[in-house]
Amino acid sequence: MSLPTPRPDLVELEGYHSPQLDVQVRLNTNESPYAPPVAFVDAWLDALRAAPLHRYPDREAGDLRRALADRLDQPTQRVFCANGSNEVIQTLLLAYGGAGRRAVVFEPTYALHGHIARLTGTQVVVGERSDDYRVSPTEAGILIASQRPAVVFLCSPNNPTGTVEPRATVEGLLAAILEHGPGLLIVDEAYGEFANWSALELVADDMPLVVTRTYSKVWSLAALRLGFAVAPPAIITELEKVALPYHLSVATQIAGREALRFDPEMRSRVEMLVSERERLAHELALLPGVTVVPSGANFVLVRFDGDGHAMWQRLVERGVLVRDFSRWPRLEGCLRITVGTPEESDLLLGALRAVLEESR
Ligand SMILES: *Cc1c(COP(=O)(O)O)cnc(C)c1O
């Protein structure tokens, strides 16, 4: 073989897979079912036409960061933007992880935390969640004391369970990190706007806390690839060192800034999805052999008595695609359902009732 092999620690890694199928109802990737407002698209394209495309974009993304900081009521120096919150997480791990350092994740959780950690040579330490999928601050504290991780990931609302951690848990993890650190707590709030509180209020210049967010879910802009972190300015400075120069295109910067001017429209989308989530969770819980995990996100995790994968397959046959977690450790029999439009929920519920009826 004349081709070189990659780094030995990468040989065993698999890429990220999320199967896409051509079906009528797609409820598998937690995107918004609603396109962004047409007036936003017009404002974005108008501003883009006026931009000097032969010049590199603003390296600091100053306008975007100021606009975001303004909306979040944070100083601009606490905001870092990148191509999706996945790139934010990668940048954090490049700066604070790496060989000889550890990252803690609490399973079951977002697979990319562990995956990106491994890509950056960071050793992954797995902590367990309780039966209700929450993180116990006591057990997490013991793990942090023994492992002394450089990075601790807390996904809240947690993907794929929807679990929102209470403020006391975030404070408990911070206290453990301050006692046994140094280390960094990364609270991934990709679904933060759907929840009833945010760790953003705990960010302070002397706290080892980073909150990451994205335009992909709440802002109906998954196609754009824009995410951001809110963290102490000293951490933002390190992230800027690690990010590639001009990594954020002018189109992305302008879109991110313009989108913020459509806050009321975005808020009404969030409200629609939250009330639809409550209706969907209620209807699902009425079905026989179905357990619904309480969710603070734009999806619900559902456990089926019996073969979850077979259920997934039969839903696909009826034109409904959800995400199959039934073969994941700790998630036996579970499917994750993105909250779509009321019509999509009804199609899903109809398909589920039909499948359950057939298999009786
Ligand atoms: C969807 C998701 C993200 C990420 O995405 P980007 O599209 O890269 O901004 C990050 N974290 C969690 C938990 C997610 O579910």
Image (cartoon, rainbow, N blue to C red):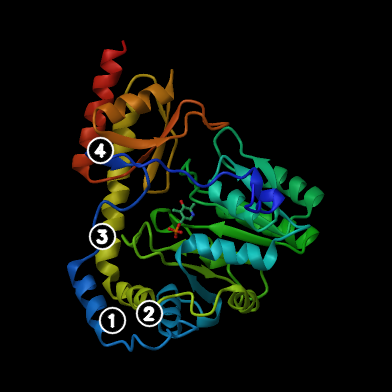
User: Where is mark 1, residue-wise?
Assistant: 48
Q: CA distance from mark 4 to mark 1?
A: 34 Å
For label 4, the SS is loop
Q: Amino acid at mark 2?
A: Val
Image spot of residue 271 (x, y percent): 29, 55
Establish if 23 lies above or below 3: above
| Mark 3 vs 1, N-terminal side | 1
Q: Is residue 208 visible?
A: no
Q: Amino acid at mark 4?
A: Val
Image spot of residue 176 (x, y percent): 74, 56
Q: Is residue 326 visible?
A: yes
User: Where is mark 3, residue-wise?
Assistant: 268
For label 3, the SS is helix
Compare residues 322 and 131 and report the one nearer the observer: 322
| Mark 2 vs 1, N-terminal side | 1
Left or right relative to 323: residue 44? left
User: Where is mark 2, residue-wise?
Assistant: 250
Mark 2 vs ligand 1: CB below 8 Å: no
User: Where is mark 4, residue-wise?
Assistant: 23
Q: CA distance from mark 2 to mark 1?
A: 8 Å
| Mark 4 vs 2, N-terminal side | 4
Tell me which residue sits at (24%, 28%) in the image.
318
Instruction: Please report contact status of discs 4 and 2: CB closer than 8 Å, yes or no.
Output: no
Q: CA distance from mark 3 to mark 2?
A: 28 Å
Q: Amino acid at mark 3?
A: Ser
Q: Amino acid at mark 1?
A: Leu
Residue 250 position by quadrant: bottom left
| Eye-nearest disc, 3 or 1 | 1
Residue 313 position by quadrant: top left
Establish if 120 lies above or below 11: below
For label 1, the SS is helix
